[in-house]
């Protein structure tokens, strides 16, 4: 794959005072990003407030993916180096979101792939426990059920805390019998925020492994492996990383890089992979770092360019500014929704970008469908109406959501 410019050069700039793009306020204030709808193919009559379900691709990411897919029609143009250059560019950009070295990142197709790789490697003894959350996303639960059953361990789900303090609830469960704490940064049906730094400290005190699913936070919440020190941390790329489906990233702590056993044994993870004429000189050695955990066919000529372009754009916006912008949007939305009888966890206990609204009882039947008829898109997860905007949303989108919610609740 051809090399791309640096993120600062390639990313679309945040428009400054005097901007005239449609849907935006035309200015940037206190780190706030004005509406970036012009970078996406989102019709004006669509209020898409569902990034936690799946993000849209930017126009530029779509173009990069289409260009890459088109190269497959002329395979004689695909050089040996193309199997490696794009992967290394992806790795280097992903490392910026973990704040780690590029060699600490493996390329994986999904969160479940990364969680399974972790489950197969971290030590779990008979009678020990694996700590998860109540209503945790299944991809970070099913692998632990399997490995716990195989090794005579048990899975312990931390109950939904009445005070919304997931961090304290997890810390209360960590003890000498804890083998693994397998949690997200953001609980996906509450928007609850976990303090992974404190949880990581507690894991190290008792010798437990820390395995993270960052799918609902990486790309929109700052994260630093030096502070948290996870053993493994994975993120699917199709949500807040703004990338295509089936492309994700796995951080692997250095202590696992030379001894860990990958899920699959493929040719491209081997130390002689760059010498196509010598691939039948079989070797037990792997490429250095986390590359041994790379999925087969990682060099996807359509998906990787799109994911690379998406990461460049996020870095141009900056994770910090995205987080601050969405936090401000959601603070206003909480106040508006309260008039309709909805409540959300306290601001200091929920992720700024992630809003799960609850009323007494279950959400009204057919709520999502009724909103969709009006071209307003959110999700219902558990008993929550999950509203997850991004920088492509405008004030008009929020107004439409509130108006349609009011009409639906009135019956």
Image: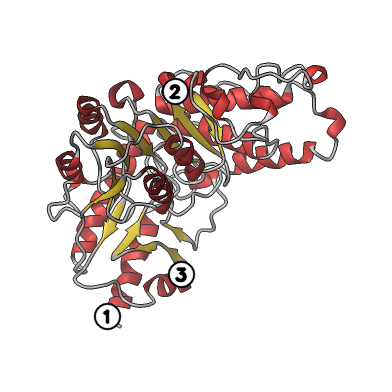
Mark toward the start of the polypeptide (3 vs 1): 3
Q: Nearer the viewer, mark 1 or mark 2?
A: 2
* Whether residue 381 is situated above or below residue 273 in the rendered picture: below
Nearer to me, 258 or 306: 258
Mark toward the start of the polypeptide (2 vs 3): 2
Kindly identify the residue that appears in the image at 20 percent across and 25 percent down. 205
| Tag 2 and tag 3, C-beta contact below 8 Å | no
Q: CA distance from mark 1 to mark 2?
A: 56 Å
Residue tagged 2: 256
* Whether residue 302 is situated above or below residue 41 in the rendered picture: above
* Whether residue 88 is situated above or below residue 401 in the rendered picture: above
- Where in the figure is residue 190, as x and y percent of width and height? 27, 54
Tell me if residue 215 can be seen: yes
Residue tagged 1: 410
Q: CA distance from mark 2 to mark 3?
A: 46 Å
Q: Nearer the viewer, mark 2 or mark 3?
A: 2
- Where in the figure is residue 268, as x and y percent of width and height? 68, 26
- Where in the figure is residue 145, as x and y percent of width and height? 38, 50
Mark toward the start of the polypeptide (1 vs 2): 2
- Please give left or right for residue 131 compared with residue 262 in the image: left
Nearer to me, 225 or 56: 225
Kindly identify the residue that appears in the image at 70 percent across and 27 percent down. 267
Kindly identify which numbered label has been placed on residue 372.
3
**Element class at badge 3:** helix
- Please give left or right for residue 265 compared with residue 182 in the image: right
- Please give left or right for residue 138 compared with residue 310 in the image: left
- Where in the figure is residue 104, as x and y percent of width and height? 48, 22
Q: CA distance from mark 3 to mark 1?
A: 17 Å
| Tag 1 and tag 2, C-beta contact below 8 Å | no
**Element class at badge 2:** helix
Quadrant of the frame with the C terminus: bottom left
């Amino acid at each position: 794959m051809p090399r791309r410019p640096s993120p600062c050069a390639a990313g679309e700039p945040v428009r400054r005072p005097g901007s005239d793009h449609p849907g935006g306020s035309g200015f940037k204030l206190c780190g706030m990003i004005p509406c970036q709808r012009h970078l996406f193919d989102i019709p004006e009559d669509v209020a898409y407030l569902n990034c936690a379900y799946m993000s849209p691709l930017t126009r530029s990411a779509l173009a990069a993916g289409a260009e890459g897919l088109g190269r497959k029609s002329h395979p004689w143009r695909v050089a040996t180096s193309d199997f490696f250059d794009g992967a290394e560019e992806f790795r280097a950009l992903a490392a910026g979101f973990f704040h780690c070295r590029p060699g600490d990142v493996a390329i994986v197709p999904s969160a479940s792939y990364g969680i399974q790789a972790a489950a197969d490697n971290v030590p779990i003894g008979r009678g020990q426990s694996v700590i998860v959350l109540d209503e945790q996303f299944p991809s970070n639960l099913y692998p632990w059920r399997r490995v716990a059953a195989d090794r005579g361990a048990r899975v312990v789900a931390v109950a939904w805390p009445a005070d919304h303090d997931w961090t304290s609830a997890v810390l209360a469960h960590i003890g000498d019998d804890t083998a693994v704490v397998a949690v997200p940064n953001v609980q996906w049906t509450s928007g609850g925020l976990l303090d992974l730094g404190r949880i990581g400290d507690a894991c190290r005190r008792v010798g437990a492994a820390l395995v993270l699913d960052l799918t609902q936070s990486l790309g929109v919440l700052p994260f630093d492996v030096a502070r948290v020190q996870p053993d493994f941390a994975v993120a699917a790329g199709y949500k807040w990383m703004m990338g295509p489906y089936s492309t994700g990233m796995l951080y692997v702590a250095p202590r696992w890089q030379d001894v860990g056993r990958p899920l699959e044994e493929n040719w491209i993870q081997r130390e002689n992979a760059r010498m196509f004429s010598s691939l039948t000189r079989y070797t037990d050695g792997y490429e250095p770092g986390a590359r041994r955990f790379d999925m087969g066919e990682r060099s996807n000529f359509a998906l990787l360019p799109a994911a690379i372009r998406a990461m460049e754009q996020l870095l141009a916006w900056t994770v910090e500014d995205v987080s601050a912008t969405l936090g401000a949007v959601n603070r206003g939305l909480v106040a508006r929704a309260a008039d309709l009888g909805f409540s959300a966890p306290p601001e200091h206990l929920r992720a700024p970008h992630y809003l799960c609204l609850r009323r007494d009882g279950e959400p009204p039947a057919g709520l999502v469908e009724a909103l969709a008829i009006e071209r307003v898109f959110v999700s219902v997860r558990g008993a929550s109406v999950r509203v997850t905007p991004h920088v492509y949303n405008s004030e008009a989108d929020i107004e439409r959501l509130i108006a349609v919610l009011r009409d639906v609740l009135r019956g």
